[in-house]
């Protein structure tokens, strides 16, 4: 039996059978519903309202159901609340589109787990003509690489189709039909899982092998399914390991740390938290699973950067915050969560372990959970604060472990480069306060934004850069934190605000007004 599902307020419709969940139907028709857990029913973020019709599902109250666990029993009208829909906010749109286009064109892509960025490049004048970003359409299948790997067991073809739809959609925004035929080269960077899914390779080996294949054969647009000049050559940037992919190699190329006498720590803040340490003589890299907390996951009121997301918070005698696009607050994004935890800590509302202190302002829910309210509808639970502490601990301990391997201290670093779009909105002082970043003079920090797309463009414009990246991969030492005894010790030590060893954070130590030591 086939049923028609109409999604409101977009009025997009699709006909599916009764074995297709509302979340799967939404994915098919291009409605982006926030589904951090990939349809496992554990995150509780894919709430929708059944306006008309009946479903095989448990009601959550007020007409809500989980889209991932709801199946049609009749034709449906499904309303997707604004706060549960992923919207394109703060993503790069077309820029400098009036520049004349030369005969030679190239495309650079950064395939992120959450966001995909594409840049159209004039190969003759060596200029970027246009850049466009969109959400990775795989987002409804899970928020992180592990959930995508698990989903691939049953849906590898679907994941491949979704990333090709994303890339081709971006291509259609960047080029008209005539321009598509003038593209001769495409360079793609991404974490190892994303590249495997693009190439329709089974990513299960990434979980089972320390060093799966991370060098890829040159192919052509037609072989992949890219709607371009069929003979355009497509190169995928090689990775270092299953969890340190070509996107991080592109970061390294963009930063040029491998050419510098200075010792540099490069941190790509994201779900995986990749870290690179080195200079022109040596380079080491590792990856630590930070979890999706900084991208809105594992926090009930956590959202990605979207209209209404709280991005800045200050607590004095009252709570002050700002939201993206100055809209009504619908949740808290990553930069706001860092601010919130830092402000709660500085005001002694939480102790160093993340517990809400008795005698401080909090609300007790009906199931006896402590929550701190920012607005009547936006709050954070005590357990969620501890999730954020675990996430920051994973990143900081990865940094500590690499430094220990190199027999260095944080004070020995000449500079710290923070990569990834997340870093552009980071309050550096608050990131240090919670122990996400080391307590060093602010002038040593440099934020490079999306280093992956910058590095990919550099390789597209300079063939020597691409050769360099292949040589670079050979000389980078990968540290597997899963088998490193020191990493767990460092991780446990980082599970406090800002750290068990408060002397590592002198500026924080001097400003702490209370809390439990």
Image (cartoon, rainbow, N blue to C red):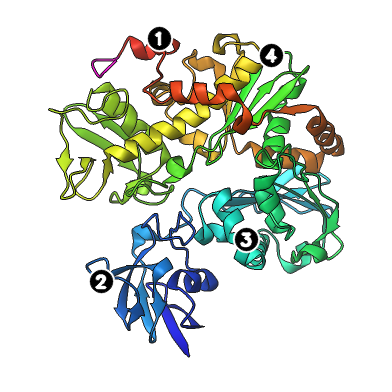
Horizontal and vertical percent position of residue 394:
50, 31
Q: Check if residue 439 falls in the magenta segment.
A: no
Instruction: Tell me the quarter of the picture where residue 313 sits.
Output: top left
The reply to whether callout 4 and callout 3 are in contact (CB within 8 Å) is: no
Q: CA distance from mark 4 to mark 3?
A: 41 Å
Q: Nearest to the eye among marks 1 and 3: give it.
A: 3
User: Does 58 appear above or below 232?
Assistant: below
Q: Check if residue 514 falls in the magenta segment.
A: yes
Q: Residue at x 45, y 60 (%)?
A: 40
Which mark is first along the chain, 1 or 2? 2
Q: Residue at x 55, y 16 (%)?
A: 444
Horizontal and vertical percent position of residue 82:
35, 61
- Observer-nearest residue: 470 or 418? 470
Q: Which residues are magenta?
A: 512-517
Instruction: Tell me the quarter of the picture where residue 476 sits.
Output: top right
Q: CA distance from mark 4 to mark 1?
A: 24 Å
Left or right relative to 244: residue 22: left
- Evaluate whether residue 475 shows in this view: yes
In the picture, the disc for residue 152 is 3
User: Does 329 appear above or below 311?
Assistant: below
């Amino acid at each position: 039996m086939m049923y028609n599902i109409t999604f409101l307020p977009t009025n997009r419709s699709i006909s599916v059978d009764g074995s297709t969940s509302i979340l799967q139907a939404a994915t098919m028709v291009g409605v982006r519903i926030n589904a951090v857990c990939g349809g496992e029913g554990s995150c509780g973020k894919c709430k929708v309202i059944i306006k008309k019709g009946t479903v095989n599902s448990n009601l959550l109250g007020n007409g809500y159901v989980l889209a991932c666990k709801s199946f049609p029993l009749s034709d449906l009208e499904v309303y997707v609340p604004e706060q549960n829909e992923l919207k394109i906010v703060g993503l790069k749109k077309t820029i400098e589109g009036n520049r004349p286009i030369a005969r030679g064109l190239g495309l650079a892509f950064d395939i992120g787990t959450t966001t995909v960025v594409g840049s159209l490049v004039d190969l003759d004048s060596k200029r970027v003509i246009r850049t466009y970003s969109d959400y990775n359409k795989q987002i409804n299948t899970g928020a992180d690489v592990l959930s995508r790997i698990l989903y691939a067991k049953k849906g590898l073809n679907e994941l491949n189709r979704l990333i090709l739809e994303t890339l081709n959609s971006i291509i259609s925004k960047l080029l008209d039909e005539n321009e598509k035929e003038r593209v001769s080269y495409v360079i793609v960077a991404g974490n190892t899982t994303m590249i495997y899914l693009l190439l329709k390779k089974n990513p299960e080996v990434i979980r089972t092998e320390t060093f799966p294949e991370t060098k890829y054969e040159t192919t052509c647009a037609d072989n992949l399914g890219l709607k371009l000049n069929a003979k355009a050559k497509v190169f995928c940037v090689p990775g270092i390991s299953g969890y340190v992919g070509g996107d991080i190699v592109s970061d390294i190329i963009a930063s040029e740390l491998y050419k510098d006498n200075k010792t540099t720590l490069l941190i790509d803040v994201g779900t995986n938290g990749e870290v690179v340490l080195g200079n022109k003589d040596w380079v080491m890299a590792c990856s630590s699973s930070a979890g999706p907390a900084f991208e809105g996951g594992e926090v009930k009121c956590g959202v990605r950067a979207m209209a209404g997301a709280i991005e800045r918070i200050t607590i004095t005698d009252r709570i002050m915050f700002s939201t993206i696009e100055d809209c009504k607050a619908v949740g808290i994004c990553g930069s706001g969560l860092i601010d919130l935890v830092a402000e709660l800590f500085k005001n002694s509302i939480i102790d160093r372990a993340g517990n809400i202190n008795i005698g401080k302002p909090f609300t007790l829910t009906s199931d006896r959970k402590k929550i701190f309210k920012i607005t009547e509808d936006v709050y954070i639970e005590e357990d969620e604060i501890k999730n954020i502490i675990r996430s920051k601990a994973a990143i900081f301990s990865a940094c500590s472990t690499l430094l220990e391997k190199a027999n260095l201290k944080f004070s020995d670093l000449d500079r710290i480069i923070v990569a990834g779009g997340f870093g552009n909105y980071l309050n550096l002082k608050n990131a240090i306060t919670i122990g996400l970043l080391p307590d060093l003079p602010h002038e040593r920090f440099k934020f490079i934004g999306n280093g992956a797309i910058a590095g990919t463009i550099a390789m597209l414009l300079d063939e020597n850069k691409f050769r360099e990246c292949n040589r670079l991969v050979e000389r980078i030492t990968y540290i597997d934190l899963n088998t490193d005894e020191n990493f767990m010790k460092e991780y446990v030590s980082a599970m406090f605000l800002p750290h068990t060893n408060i002397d590592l954070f002198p500026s924080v130590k001097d400003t702490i007004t209370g809390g439990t030591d």
